[in-house]
Image (cartoon, coloured by chain):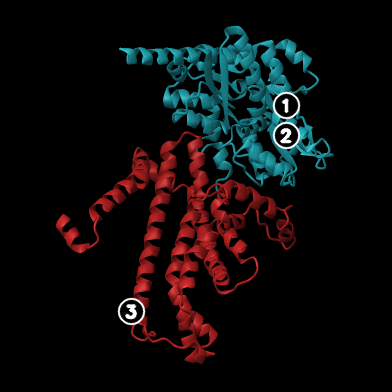
Chain colours: A cyan, B red
Amino acid sequence: MKKIAIILGLILAFSIQGLAQVTLLNVSYDPTRELYQDYNAAFAKYWKAKTGQDVTIQQSHSGSSKQARAVIDGLQADVVTLALAYDIDAISQNAGLLPADWQKRLPQNSTPYTSTIVFLVRKGNPKKIKDWDDLVRPGVSVITPSPKTSGGARWNYLAAWAYALQQPGGTEAKAQDFVKRLYKNVPVLDSGARGATTTFAQREIGDVLIAWENEAFLSIKELGADKVEMVVPSMSILAEPPVSIVDKVVDKKGTRAVAQAYLEYLYTPEGQEIVARNYYRPRLEAVAKKYASTFPKIKLVTIDEVFGGWQKAQKTHFADGAIFDQIYQPGN
Amino acid sequence: MAIVFKKRSILPGFGMTLGFTVSYLCLIVLIPLSATFLKAATLTWPRFWHVISDPRALASYRITFGASLIAALINLVFGLLVAWVLVRYTFPGRRIVDSLVDLPFALPTAVAGIALTAIYSSHGWVGRYLEMIGIKAAYSPLGIVIALTFIGLPFVVRTVQPVLEDLDKDMEEAAASLGANRFQVFSKVILPAIWPAALTGFTMAFARAIGEYGSVVFISGNMPMRTEITPLLIITKLDQYDYAGATAIAVVMLVASFVLLLTINLLQRWSSKAQRAQSSPDSVAPGIHLDPIYVQ
């Protein structure tokens, strides 16, 4: 009897302890490392003040689709914050860990922040690169990762395609020819965005790097404005990196409330402020206005209006044997 | 069966150790590998064939196996040389050089890849000068060979070294006293003795190179049809959630590697047998010990 009482007491003690402390795992992609370091500290403070509960957030970063695969294969992620909706769709389709309509559950397509695709060139812009059509000029060497392995690179590719399509007289065929010429100028296909940045910045290969806007800001901060500069094209794509809770995991761990709050806090003025400080474009009007001078004005198109969503874009452009693969087919 | 085994082996503990060996190998090697085959089996035959015979896949097999073979051959030649120097000569810093040989084992391959790329790219220390004479090292098939040579370096050295250490100097001296010149001593006495070990080292370096991913992706440039290695193609397929397609290519790699390794092993057994048959009657008989003084 006594033993049982002790064991019960221990269990109780542990569960109280458990109530007062909770751990979340945020599985994210490469360039959000700095953003979520800031954000996690802020959220932990907010959650403690609101509920008295201590929350520890663990982060994991890698290529977006690698991360999605880890979650599919059993990584116990409470929330996923990935580079593109297609990767979260994959978690839903391949493992059924979250419902198919996950993207409708949070405001703005579940993307609390956006980014876009810009160019990084060498100091002084020796090749006079101003816009997308400068990238297909002969003699210009372009660095971009492989869209087969990198989420960011898919945004790069689609931005180029959208540009060609929206030129006067632009057609699908012309756009296809445009991206083909662009990729003929690519000497190295790195497997991820950070790798491509290294190739451009450290190895000094290429005249222009197509990059996430926030990566471009970070590179300039790191390398110094005397080495590289940013070029903003006439138009680009609105990159929407979405977030979601992973239902099956949060229900098993009993962390649904805190995980939900973690994502919702991203939409608050405080969250948006952190987002903007880390060079992601905020959604909230007031914060966007405050940081208007940071983010250059670009005409942005969305993947839904030009490509009919990720599922379709993936199938037409990036699947095996699709348009991107055809660029490298012999005889092309 | 059990009786036959018992008759054959005089040493105790045969049944138990064999049992352990088999279950250990099953757990570590066979089960994961059969999972690969099972996953690939979810594809229909025409689809399987389509995936593995895609021009891009074929190009990747060529570059992977070709570069691995070249790298292993380079390692064979220079590995023998390094082993020779380390065993036969004493010089200051020999121990340091000796431990340097193992570094490619310990270094994370990604670090190796980044370091090699930094050195061999067109702005790197070495790449700059290679570029001047028109050789593009990084981001070309040559870059892949460089990375694979680096990671395969220790194998030949470490397999040949102990054999070379054990090699009786008397044999060489005897050969010399019987009128053999230096080349004859090397090719008729030393080489046959170290050849099986060298071949083992070569096989290991070759096998290691085929599976290498981490260092190569940094230096190869990953251009489809040109410098895209098969392991990268597998990763690419996985990143598209094409598990079956990825395992189909993995099965090709697996079967090809297995066949190659088996062939080399058979070759090795055959050559050592042939060598034993040839050398046993007229080699210096054990027990007859030539006094080194006569040789000098």
Identified by mark 2, the residue type is Trp
Closer to the eye: label 1 or 3: 3
* Nearer the observer, A89 or A195: A195
Q: In the rendered structure, the residue with mark 2 lies on which chain?
A: A
Q: Are marks 2 and 1 on the same chain?
A: yes
| Residue B90 higher or lower than B235, as above or below | below
- For residue B277, the mark is 3
| Residue B12 higher or lower than A36, as above or below | below
- Disc 1 target residue: A235
Whether residues under marks 2 and 1 lie with C-beta atoms below 8 angstroms apart, the answer is yes
For label 3, the crowd category at 10 Å Cα-Cα, with few meaning under 14, some 14 to 19 and many 20 or more, is few
- Calculate the distance from the C-alpha at mark 2 to the C-alpha at mark 1: 9 Å
Tell me, yes or no, if residue A99 can be seen here.
Answer: no
Residue in view at x 62 percent, y 20 percent: A40
- Calculate the distance from the C-alpha at mark 1 to the C-alpha at mark 3: 77 Å
Identified by mark 3, the residue type is Ala
Where residue A194 appears, x then y in whole percent? 65, 37
- Disc 2 target residue: A132
Residue in view at x 16 percent, y 60 percent: B4
Identified by mark 1, the residue type is Met
Of the numbered discs 2 and 1, the one sitting upstream in the chain is 2
- For residue A48, the mark is none
